Image (cartoon, rainbow, N blue to C red):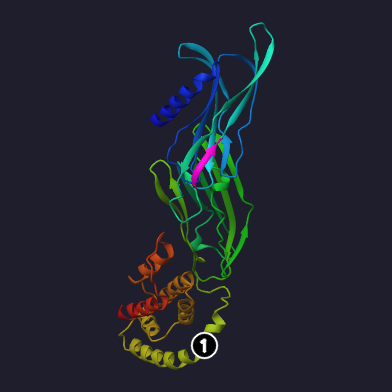
C-alpha cells in the first residue's frame, strides 16, 4: 500500500504541469514473479464535465490481462479542487521475467465546454516499468492467492464390483489467476486400465475477491483384470502469492481392485506365469504338500498355517512380474505385484515397503533408488518374517 502511494505521489507531481487533466497507471506490486497477478489502476483526474470516453488497454506478448471490475466514475477533491475521477481495474499477468513495460495508455474524452459546446481531448498516461522475477520453481508457472484441489470418486476403488465403472472427477480452483494458467490434464492411462476421458471444462470467473480460474477433469475408469493395482499420484506445483512460497497440490494415488478378488477375472498374466512356474511348483510344491499333510494328520498344524507355510516354499505366481518390473524400473507395477504377492502369502507389508512408497508418492522422492536392490530387500524381509 505504501509503495502504491509513493508511486502515485511521484506520478501526480509529474502530471501537475498538464493542467486540468492527468492520467496515471498505478500498481500494487514491486516484486512480482512470472504469472503472478499484478493489480493495476488506471486513474484519471479531470477538471472537466465528461460526456463520452474511450480507452483501450494495450495488448502485449509480454503479459496477459483482464479487466476485473466496471469502470468507476465519481467526484473527489484533489488539492482542494473538486474533480471528476475515473478508475479502471486491470489484473495483469507477466509471461516472462525481466523488465516489463506497461503503457502508455490513452483516454479519449468528449466533454462539455463552458458555453455548452462539445469538445474532445486525449489524455495519456506515461508507461511504467515493472521488474519481474523468474518463477521460483522448475515447473510451468502458476501463481495464485489460494488454490483448492478436489478429487471425487463415485465408488470405493479398492472394492469395485465386477464390470463396475469408477467415475473420477478432479476440480482445481485458484484465486488470482487465469484458467489457461492451470495445469494440463494429467495422463492416467495404464496398460491394466480401461479409461474414457470426458471433455475438459476450463473457465475464469470474476468475483469481488478477484478472478477465479477453474478446471474440471472427469474420467470413467475400469481395471482390465481383477488383480489389485495402483493408479500413480500426480503433483501440481504453484506459487502462493500471499506467503511467497512454493506449494504442491497433490493428486493422491488410487488403489484399484475388485471386492473379494480371487478369481482374477481372466488375468492375462496367469497363463504366462503358470507356464514359467509350473515345473517348479509341481516338484517343490508337491514335496511340501506331502509334508504339510503329514503334519496336519498328526494334529501339529492347522489348515491356514499349513497353507502359509507351504507358500513360503514356493516362489509364488507374482515372482516374474516383480522381477520384470524391477528390471524395467516400472515402480507402479512393482508396487502392485508386491501387493499381490503379500496377499497371496497372507503376510502384512514389511517395513521396506515404505521405501518404495516414498519413491512413488512423495512430492520430492530421494534420489538413487535401485528397484532391483529394493526387491532383494523385500524378499529378505519376507523370509525373515
Counting from the top left corner in percent of width and height, residue 207 is at: 53, 33
Note whether 19 is above or below 349 in the view shown.
Answer: above
- Magenta region includes residue 101: yes
- Magenta region includes residue 200: no
**Residue shown at the point (61%, 35%) measured from the top left:** 58
Which quarter of the figure is the C terminus placed in? bottom left
Total residue callouts:
1
Counting from the top left corner in percent of width and height, residue 63 is at: 56, 42
Instruction: State which region is magenta.
Output: 97-102
**Residue shown at the point (52%, 48%) measured from the top left:** 96
For disc 1, the neighbor class at 10 Å (few under 14, some 14 to 19, many from 20) is few
Q: Residue furthest right?
A: 117
The part of the image, by quadrant, that contains residue 288 is bottom left
Which quarter of the figure is the N terminus placed in? top left
Query: In the structure shown, which secondary structural element does the residue marked by tag 1 occupy?
Result: helix
Q: Main secondary structure of the magenta part?
A: strand
**Residue shown at the point (69%, 10%) measured from the top left:** 117
Counting from the top left corner in percent of width and height, residue 7 is at: 44, 29
Front one among 63 and 139: 63
The part of the image, by quadrant, that contains residue 106 is top right
Note whether 233 is above or below 192 in the view shown.
Answer: above
**In this view of the protein, can residue 85 be seen by the observer?**
no
Q: Residue furthest front?
A: 17
Question: Which residue carries the number 1 mark?
Answer: 276
**In this view of the protein, can residue 31 be seen by the observer?**
yes
Note whether 272 is above or below 72 in the view shown.
Answer: below
Front one among 313 and 301: 313
Counting from the top left corner in percent of width and height, residue 262 is at: 50, 73
Front one among 195 and 56: 56
Front one among 49 and 149: 49
Amino acid at each position: 500500500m505504501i509503495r502504491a502511494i509513493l508511486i502515485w505521489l511521484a506520478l501526480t507531481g509529474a502530471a501537475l504541469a498538464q493542467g486540468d487533466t492527468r492520467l496515471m497507471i498505478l500498481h500494487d506490486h514491486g516484486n512480482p514473479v512470472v504469472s503472478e497477478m499484478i493489480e493495476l489502476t488506471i486513474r484519471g483526474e479531470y477538471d472537466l464535465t465528461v460526456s463520452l470516453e474511450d480507452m483501450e488497454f494495450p495488448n502485449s506478448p509480454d503479459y496477459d490481462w483482464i479487466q476485473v471490475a466496471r469502470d468507476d466514475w465519481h467526484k473527489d477533491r484533489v488539492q482542494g479542487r473538486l474533480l471528476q475521477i475515473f478508475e479502471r481495474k486491470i489484473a495483469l499477468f507477466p509471461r516472462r521475467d525481466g523488465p516489463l513495460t506497461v503503457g502508455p495508455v490513452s483516454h479519449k474524452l468528449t466533454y462539455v465546454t463552458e458555453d455548452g459546446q462539445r469538445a474532445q481531448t486525449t489524455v495519456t498516461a506515461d508507461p511504467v516499468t515493472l521488474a519481474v522475477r523468474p518463477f521460483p520453481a522448475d515447473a510451468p508457472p502458476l501463481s495464485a492467492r489460494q488454490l483448492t484441489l478436489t478429487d471425487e470418486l463415485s465408488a470405493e476403488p479398492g472394492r469395485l464390483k465386477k464390470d463396475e465403472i469408477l467415475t473420477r472427477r478432479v476440480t482445481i480452483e485458484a484465486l488470482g489467476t487465469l484458467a489457461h494458467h492451470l495445469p494440463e490434464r494429467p495422463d492416467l492411462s495404464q496398460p491394466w486400465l480401461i479409461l474414457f476421458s470426458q471433455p475438459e471444462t476450463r473457465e475464469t470467473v470474476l468475483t469481488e475477491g478477484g478472478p477465479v480460474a477453474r478446471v474440471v477433469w472427469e474420467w470413467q475408469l475400469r481395471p482390465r483384470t481383477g488383480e489389485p493395482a495402483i493408479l500413480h499420484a500426480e503433483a501440481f506445483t504453484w506459487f502462493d502469492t500471499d506467503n511467497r512460497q512454493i506449494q504442491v497440490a497433490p493428486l493422491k494415488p488410487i488403489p484399484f481392485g475388485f471386492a473379494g478378488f480371487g478369481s482374477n477375472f481372466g488375468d492375462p498374466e496367469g497363463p504366462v506365469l503358470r507356464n514359467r512356474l509350473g515345473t517348479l511348483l509341481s516338484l517343490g510344491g508337491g514335496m511340501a504338500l506331502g509334508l504339510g499333510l503329514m503334519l496336519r494328520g498328526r494334529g501339529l498344524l492347522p489348515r491356514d498355517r499349513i497353507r502359509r507355510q507351504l507358500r513360503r516354499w514356493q516362489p509364488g505366481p507374482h515372482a516374474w512380474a516383480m522381477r520384470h518390473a524391477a528390471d524395467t524400473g516400472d515402480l507402479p507395477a512393482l508396487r502392485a505385484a508386491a501387493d499381490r504377492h503379500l496377499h497371496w502369502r497372507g503376510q502384512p507389508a514389511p517395513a521396506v515397503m515404505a521405501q518404495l512408497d516414498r519413491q512413488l508418492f512423495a512430492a520430492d522422492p530421494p534420489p538413487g533408488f535401485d528397484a532391483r536392490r529394493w526387491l532383494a530387500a523385500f524378499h529378505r524381509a519376507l523370509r525373515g518374517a
